Image (spheres, rainbow, N blue to C red):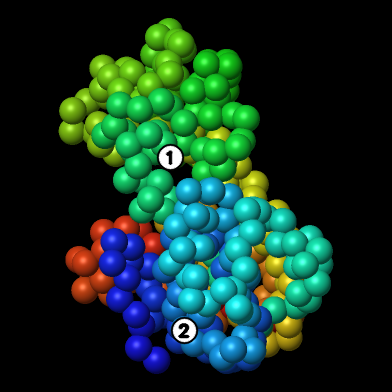
Amino acid sequence: MTVPNFPNHIPVMPNEVLSLMDLNPQGKYVDGTCGLGGHAEIILSGLSKNGFLLGLDVDKDAIGICRKRLNNFKTNFQIEKKSYAEMSNILETLDIGQVDGILLDLGLSSLQLDSKSRGFSFKETSHLDMRFDQDSNVDAANLINKSSESEIADIIYYYGEERRSRSIAKKIFQNRPINKVDQLVEILKKCTPPHKRNKTLARVFQSFRIVVNKELDNLSSFLENYLSCLKIGGKIIIISFHSLEDRIVKRSFKKSSKEGLIDIITKKPIIASEDERIKNSRSKSAKLRCAVKL
């Protein structure tokens, strides 16, 4: 099957996803992180009129774009504003039953990262938001301004894997309230050596984003329940973008494999080809793991 070309949005490892998913044209699938619909369009293009894809996402901006993009597939595509962590309940509520394959493409979408008002990029001057779900009550500014110094340090250390978390947290705590991206960036610049700034900025922003969106909690919750959503022989594909996510997926797959529940297809994670990494910078840190339910 030829992978369609998507203007302005390039899904990560599309050929690998198609090959590993090995679509049943009449099958039922879930894209748990539908985003702008790049992977969803690939899957839908491989389904017959009797096939079905359920898309899930919590970002209402992305959902609006995805609906328009996939309008031609509306007879066998449905998207819901829900977290993939709730997948088992959603499939039951919608009376879909078990599915033939599930895809998760974790982390930021290009829409979120490129937005000048969402606060995901440390190159912007917007409000410190960082919420995937704009209807959520807690954004990054709330988190920073209401947490204790030790809590901020722990967030940066455990979710950003930043060794200088204590000194950074002290500076943040001393300069509160912090409500805008550029405020936080200036504080971080003052307490970070120039040659380490970009990596430190990325780690700190990642740490707050993960906690605001409960990313690791949602992933862990999903991994406890996804097998009930899959048919025997159904595939699970998860694309992660940092070691914290990949570690959780790896350990879960290993445990389920030892229990005889799944067969791990990717003994080592698949990474994007050199050509893809050049064309799509987002793919550089991506790791894909796949398993099949026994």
Question: Which residue is identified by label 1?
Answer: 206
**SS at circle 2:** helix
- Residue 230 coordinates in the image, percent (x, y): 71, 77
Closer to the camera in the image, 103 or 266: 103
Checking the image for residue 45, the label placed there is: 2
The furthest residue to the top: 174
The quarter of the picture where residue 48 lies is bottom right
- Residue 128 coordinates in the image, percent (x, y): 43, 27
Q: Is residue 217 left or right of residue 246?
A: right
The crowd level at tag 1 (other Cα within 10 Å; few <14, some 14-19, many 20+) is: many
The quarter of the picture where residue 137 lies is top right
Q: Is residue 1 left or right of residue 258?
A: left
Closer to the camera in the image, 140 or 269: 140
- Quarter of the image with the C terminus is bottom right
Q: CA distance from mark 2 to mark 1?
A: 34 Å
- Quarter of the image with the N terminus is bottom left
